[in-house]
Image (spheres, grey):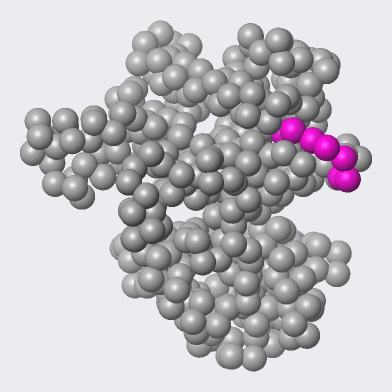
Amino acid sequence: MKILVINAGSSSLKYQLIDMENEHVIAKGNCERIGIQGGLITHKTDAGVKLEVRCDFPSHTEAFEKLVEVLTSGEGKVIEDVSEISAVGHRVLHGSEVYKESTLITDKVIEDIDSFWELGPLHNPPQAATMRACRKALGNAVPMVAVFDTSFHQTMPDKAFMYGIPYEYYEKYSIRKYGFHGTSHRYVSSHYLEITGRKDGESRVVVCHLGNGSSISAVKNGKCVDTSMGLTPLDGLIMGTRSGSVDPSIVTFLMNKEGFTPDEMNAVLNKKSGFLGISGLSSDARDLVNASKEGHKRAKLACDMFRYQIKKYIGSYAAAMGGLDAVLFTGGIGENSDEARAEICEGLEFLGIELDETENKTRTGKDHKISKGKTEVWIIPTDEEMTIARDTVELVEKLGK
């Protein structure tokens, strides 16, 4: 069974074609700058073919049509016809409170995903549009599955996901903590249980998904009990251009002082803050690390803030779970920055965390234990696409599609 996995962003469309008989990636690529001039599709196959084709994508519909073209024709061809695609798995940012697990896509599901646009304005509309384009290109007979970023966090108790605002706003507008990066948190936490043989045992794990967007989750006995992102991905840690958690009064204070509209204030918090806003230099953590070593004080401040906040989350989640068995690092920063991991774990010896300095600096690109203390610390590369593909196969087979 060949599964096409689709991850549509606001201006991009990533894809992987996976043969699920051996979970082998046949081809993968990305359509970039959708709706912007200078579009580009990059395409790689398991045979080593690498293509870069410049073509404009007015919308996600044209982007999907192009990825079908490169999969079925030309130098990057890996299948004879789209009929070889058994099903399609779509990553979806927000499922509100309606979708608590992966689901088979129907017209109603697409309409619902589109209707959640206020909760995920940059992602839900293009993801719904991509589903429609997919159905148009492949036909109604090819089943599609929606895998929601928010679903893994639906096991949080209400004491963890509710905000201290009038309850009526939860009832009227579903305002609550949802959490994101759920597919990554699910893969990393469950994979840890598998490789350590804890699958059926009790476990208290903190997953640190660290990149340009970052989030942390507390996973007890395989279930999420808390997470750092909230109603939207803006909450929690300081990130590339996102502020993370701030005193809510800062919003109204700045709107009054600067005369910002709600949309302008939203742009400040989402696009002008975080690493970029603090450093005044870059939103890329690698640039900040290099600048810090050259004496750039604000770059160092941004790095220090990020690592300090993560340390606090690990401690608070250990308290919430009544202990800690492991800390798991994933994502671009989590997997690649030994310096960040060392600073985050420093001072957490009281939780049983003790890094092995040599192992922490060793890069394998694979699952890798980097601790020697009672509480384990691991690097586990995430694989969201494989999780989406597995969910798709499971649902399609269960429904006899």
The residue sitting at 72% across, 58% down in the picture is 386
- Residue 170 in which image quadrant: bottom left
| Left or right placement of residue 85 versus residue 41 in this view | right
Which percent across, then down, holds residue 322? 70, 26
- Residue 284 in which image quadrant: top left
| Residue closer to the observer: 360 or 158 | 158
Residue 81 vs 47, above or below: the answer is below
Q: Which residues are magenta?
A: 199-205
The residue sitting at 43% across, 15% down in the picture is 300
The residue sitting at 41% across, 42% down in the picture is 163
Residue 201 among magenta residues: yes
Which percent across, then down, holds residue 143? 65, 82
Which percent across, then down, holds residue 324? 73, 26
Residue 151 vs 162, above or below: the answer is below
The residue sitting at 63% across, 29% down in the picture is 320
| Residue closer to the observer: 4 or 106 | 106
Residue 357 among magenta residues: no
Marker count (numbered): 0
Instruction: Report if residue 91 is visible in the image.
Output: no
| Residue closer to the observer: 349 or 226 | 226
Q: Residue furthest front?
A: 167
Residue 89 vs 139, above or below: the answer is above
Which percent across, then down, holds residue 97? 50, 61
| Left or right placement of residue 317 versus residue 211 in this view | right
Quadrant of the image for the N terminus?
Answer: bottom right
| Left or right placement of residue 317 versus residue 114 in this view | right
Instruction: Report if residue 251 is visible in the image.
Output: yes
- Residue 392 in which image quadrant: bottom right
